[in-house]
Image (tube, helix red, strand yellow):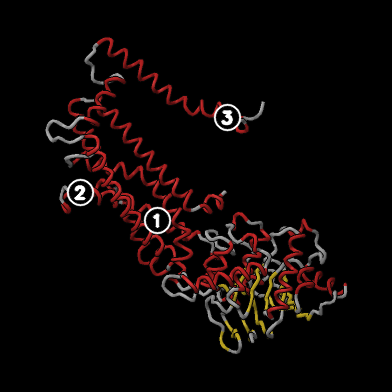
């Protein structure tokens, strides 16, 4: 018998083992749901799969009686725009500040302590300030996402820039590069895939801040919807919405990973 | 023309003396190999020539003028590793040498000038035997090919001085032999001034036209950092094999086997 750390599952097992937890959770849910529904067909807490599918299809295809819009798609597009704006702005700020503080000693001395302190402030504690200062509109929600993830990206990029081998920076100088060209031709290309990696890690937090701000003040959006219907214990809508959000988060992560693989083919090879 | 002159040069880190009172004059076209026990300051010496570190005392001159105190295109370098840009192909790595310095804002060349630069880059790749690998990324190249690429990249700038910091230390013995021939050929053809740090005594003797041995002359067991290293041997090398007694003398001085086996070279 080999040690446990030296045993690896074969090809069919790998897939089966990966699926196992999903299947188990699904089975537990189905049996619990069936038990409750058998006692009370109107039980709202654990709705049947069919009921959830019906509700989801309704919000996806039938116009809302009050607004005449397709609820799911309006919620999704509004939320994704907020998320995209917030993440995009945070990436830009994070890249610029991170590269400068990582590469230029004067910039590091000036901004590094400030960024460290900034990143200690719990973003949700700032949310009331943002709502007061920027109003309850789109700006405050985007600002919360930026405030929540930009410091993380800044610090990550700064670290990655500092990790670049000194030899490469010296080499670029012996080839006649000035500071701007070192940023443009050496640092940025090498840090871009790392920026996408950092963004992938920050996406989870970005979703958290999006849903939190939508829960507190919004008129549409994925987070707004699930907190709205919570008042009616509408699990038929909440559960599919959560799955939908999970799917969107998964796809965003996948897209970022694909970009890294296609646009920066040298990146994975170097790390392996 | 590219002479290097050091006058009474000292290098200290706080109270630790690394190099003490180095005096050296190197003529244009010399191939200086540098050996010494580890920690004797030979790499520090190379970094000072490179401009990465400055002397704490004394004067360093390049062609009679004070040596710039940051790296620049007049001094090319090849390190043991991390010498090429991982995000560029072999051709891109050589081409970037041409692009940097000629364009201040974009750092890229376009149109006719790019085509001309590309021609030169391809010629340089051919000169180091990499014409087949132009489209490959460094991670797809072997260790020897990566070092060839690093040399090609450094030579694109026509540096006055080429600095080699244990460039073949991580290569297999057979490949190392090929690299010796390449460097030797480039040196003879282009009239370069080369400084090469190595820990392989045989390599140092065979490759260079002048051998410098760095070592501490004085030791204080109570304060290991109190005295720095100096140049203890300065041996002009004819290209015939030196007498075995020279090998032995230098080997004894450094406390190393003058004919190291491949396994020992790894360290």
Residue nearer the viewer, B57 or A215: A215
| Residue under pointer 3 | A11
Q: Quadrant of residue B195?
A: bottom right
Q: Quadrant of residue A207?
A: top left
Residue at the spot 64% in from the left edge and 69% down from the top edge: B151
Residue at the spot 38% in from the left edge and 67% down from the top edge: A107
Above or below for A144 versus A234: below
CB-based contact (under 8 Å), mark 3 and mark 1? no
Q: Tag 2, which secondary structure?
A: helix
Above or below for B8 versus A232: below
The first of marks 3 and 1 along the sequence is 3
| Residue under pointer 1 | A155
Q: Tag 3, which secondary structure?
A: helix
| Residue under pointer 2 | A138
The image shows residue A225 at horizontal and vertical percentages of 21, 34
Q: Chain of mark 2?
A: A
Which one is closest to the eye, mark 3 or mark 2? 3
């Amino acid at each position: 018998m080999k040690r446990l750390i030296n045993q690896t599952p074969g090809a069919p097992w790998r897939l089966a083992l990966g699926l196992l937890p999903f299947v188990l959770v699904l089975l537990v849910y189905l049996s619990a749901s069936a038990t409750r529904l058998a006692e009370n067909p109107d039980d709202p807490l654990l709705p049947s799969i069919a009921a959830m599918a019906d509700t989801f299809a309704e919000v996806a295809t039938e116009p809302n009686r009050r607004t005449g819009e397709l609820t799911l798609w309006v919620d999704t597009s509004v939320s994704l725009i907020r998320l995209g704006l917030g993440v995009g702005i945070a990436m830009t700020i994070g890249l610029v500040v991170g590269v400068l503080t990582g590469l230029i000693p004067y910039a590091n001395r000036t901004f590094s302590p400030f960024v460290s302190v900034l990143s200690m402030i719990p973003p949700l504690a700032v949310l009331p300030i943002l709502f007061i200062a920027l109003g309850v509109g789109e700006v405050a929600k985007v600002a919360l996402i930026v405030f929540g993830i930009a410091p993380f990206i800044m610090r990550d990029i700064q670290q990655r820039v500092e990790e670049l081998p000194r030899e490469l920076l010296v080499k670029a100088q012996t080839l006649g590069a000035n500071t701007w060209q070192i940023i443009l031709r050496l640092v940025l290309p090498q840090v871009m895939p790392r920026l996408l990696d950092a963004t992938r890690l920050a996406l989870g937090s970005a979703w958290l801040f999006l849903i939190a701000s939508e829960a507190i003040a919004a008129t549409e959006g994925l987070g707004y919807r699930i907190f709205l219907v919570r008042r009616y214990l509408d699990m038929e809508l909440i559960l599919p919405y959560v799955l939908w959000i999970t799917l969107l988060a998964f796809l965003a992560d996948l897209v970022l990973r694909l970009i890294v693989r296609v646009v920066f083919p040298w990146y994975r090879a170097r790390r392996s | 023309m590219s002479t290097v002159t050091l006058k009474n040069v000292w290098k200290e880190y706080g109270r630790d003396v690394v190099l003490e009172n180095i005096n050296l004059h190197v003529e244009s076209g010399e191939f200086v190999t540098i050996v010494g026990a580890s920690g004797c300051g030979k790499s520090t010496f190379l970094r000072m020539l490179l401009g990465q570190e400055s002397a704490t005392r004394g004067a360093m001159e390049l062609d009679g003028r004070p040596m710039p105190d940051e790296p620049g295109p007049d001094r090319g370098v090849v390190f043991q590793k991390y010498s090429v840009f991982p995000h560029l192909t072999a051709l891109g790595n050589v081409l970037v040498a041409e692009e940097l310095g000629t364009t201040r804002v974009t750092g890229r060349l376009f149109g006719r000038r790019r085509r001309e630069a590309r021609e030169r880059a391809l010629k340089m790749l051919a000169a180091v035997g990499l014409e087949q690998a132009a489209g490959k990324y460094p991670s797809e190249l072997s260790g020897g090919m990566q070092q060839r690429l690093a040399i090609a990249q450094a030579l694109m700038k026509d540096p006055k001085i080429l600095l080699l910091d244990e460039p073949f230390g991580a290569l297999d013995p057979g490949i190392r032999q090929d690299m010796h021939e390449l460097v030797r050929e480039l040196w003879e053809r282009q009239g370069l001034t080369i400084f090469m740090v190595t820990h392989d005594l045989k390599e140092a003797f065979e490759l260079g036209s002048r051998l410098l041995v760095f070592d501490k002359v004085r030791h204080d067991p109570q304060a290991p950092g109190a005295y720095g290293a100096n140049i203890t041997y300065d041996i002009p090398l004819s290209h015939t094999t030196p007498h075995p007694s020279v090998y032995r003398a230098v080997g004894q001085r450094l406390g190393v086997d003058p004919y190291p086996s491949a396994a020992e070279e790894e360290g």
